[in-house]
Image (cartoon, rainbow, N blue to C red):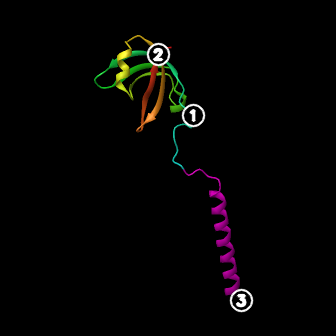
Amino acid sequence: MKYANALAIVLALAAALAAFAAGSMDGMDMKPATQSQQAPRPVAAEIKKIDQKAGKVTLKHDPIENLGMSAMTMAFPVKNRVVLENFKVGDTVSVTFDNVDGKATVVDMRHP
């Protein structure tokens, strides 16, 4: 009798744990976490330096919400370095940033 009671308790616990595990996974998004789920939006910035050869631009920019970055001055790679030919240091620009290959990258830059 003791054996039957112990077996019943073990089976009940196993069933409860299985139900809990299945319930806790229900509706969970199993994708890797990203910095933000926001779509990229243009950000106001000022060009401080252009490195055409390296394909980088240093910008004093407003907060970049989709990357979770506060306002600061920082160098960024540019997705298409040819676009840098259209700008000069001191220009005020509207810049769209996104995460490209794990790096905050300028994907679009325009004069406002």
Nearer to us in this view, 20 or 108: 108
Judged from the image, the secondary structure of the residue bearing numbered disc 1 is loop
The residue labelled by disc 1 is 38
Judged from the image, the secondary structure of the residue bearing numbered disc 2 is strand
Tell me which residue sits at (50%, 32%) in the image.
67
The residue labelled by disc 2 is 93
Quarter of the image that includes the N terminus: bottom right
- The numbered mark, 2 or 1, whose residue comes first in the sequence reads 1
Spatial separation of the CA atoms under disc 1 and disc 3: 61 Å
Tell me which residue sits at (38%, 15%) in the image.
86
Q: Give the residues drawn in magenta, as a range.
A: 1-30
The residue labelled by disc 3 is 1
Tell me which residue sits at (62%, 57%) in the image.
25
Vertical position of residue 35 compared to residue 21: above or below: above
Residue 107 percent location from the top left of the image: 44, 28
| Mark 1: amino acid | Gln
- 3 left or right, relative to 82: right
Spatial separation of the CA atoms under disc 3 and disc 2: 81 Å
| Mark 3: amino acid | Met
- The numbered mark, 3 or 2, whose residue comes first in the sequence reads 3
Vertical position of residue 22 compared to residue 110: above or below: below
Judged from the image, the secondary structure of the residue bearing numbered disc 3 is loop
- 25 left or right, relative to 33: right
Quarter-wise, where is residue 57 in the image?
Answer: top left
